[in-house]
Structure formats: C-alpha cells, structure tokens
Image (cartoon, grey):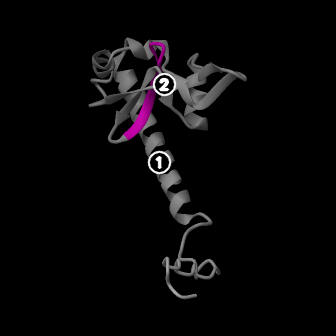
Amino acid sequence: MDADTIADLFSAFGAVRVKRMFGGGGVYAEGVMIALDADDILYLKADASFAAELEARGSHPFSYEAKTGRRTITSYWRLPEAAMDDPEDLATLARRALVIARAAEAAKAGKSKGGKASGTRAERGKPAPSAPRRRGAPK
C-alpha cells in the first residue's frame, strides 16, 4: 500500500508517517509505530487485551515465512475488514494502538534505564574500570 493510501485511511485518526521497511512499511504516529503494512495488509500494534478484541472481530496476528518456518508476531494484528470502510472505527482502533505503542516504548525505555545495568558501577557494587594506559607511559 502506498503512503498516500495509508494516510487517507488514517485521516480520521490524524497524521501518520510511513517508513519503508522489510518490503512493507511501518506506520508511525507521534513518533511510535502503531501499525505495520505488509503485502498491502495493515496490522495494528496490540497487547493481549486488544489482540483478543481484534481476534473476536475475525483478525489474526501478523506472520511471515522464514527460512526455519512460519513466524508469528503477536504484537501486530490485522486491521478488521470492517474498519477499512469505516474511518471512525479505524480511528478508534488506531488510537488504541497508539496507547499500546506508547506503553511498549515506555516499558522498553524503563528496562534500559531501570534494569540490571542502571546506576553507576559503584552503585552496582562493581569497581570503576582503571584508566587505559597510554602508549609509552611508565607502568
């Protein structure tokens, strides 16, 4: 699907930007990826609760064929067919995907800041690394 078509579909939701990736495209709103375009099919970012709602509407998760077999990515679920013809429905679903995408980004940022590697070396009980010896400096 081209970027203009995607922008038109999401017009009731708001501005989106499409970045080409892996033969498809990532659909971004407010700096986070809320949807995936693969083979002209849109998949929305989903958590377990949203995935269950989408599944109840006949949706399924994104999957692709890899060298080792079929892979399924459960964090992206197909946009229900009915939403393709209903701009308000699509906008509602896209807003939900945006909230989920923001939460996922926040969780990712929290892991990198608050995980095992957070704090100074001393706070983690490790000695500071010694400064590298300059070439030609006495031992």
* Picture layout, residue 24 above or below residue 28: above
Under mark 1, the amino acid is Glu
Task: State which tag comes first along the sequence, 1 or 2.
Answer: 2
- The relative height of residue 6 versus residue 14 in the rendered view (above or below) is above
Spot the residue most to the right. Answer: 68
According to the picture, the residue beneath numbered tag 2 turns out to be 22
Q: Position of residue 64 (x, y in %)?
A: 61, 20
- The spot of residue 24 in percent (x, y) is 45, 21
Residue at image x 43%, y 45%?
Answer: 102
Q: Dot 2: within a 10 Å radius of its alpha carbon, few (fewer than 14), some, or many (20 or more) residues?
A: few
Tell me the number on the disc at residue 105: 1
5 sits to left or right of 35:
left
Question: What residue lies at 66% left-to-right and 25% top-to-bottom?
Answer: 71
The residue located at (31%, 30%) in the rendering is: 17
- Looking at the rendering, the stretch of residues picked out in magenta corresponds to 32-42
Q: Amino acid at mark 2?
A: Phe
Disc number lying in front (1 or 2): 2
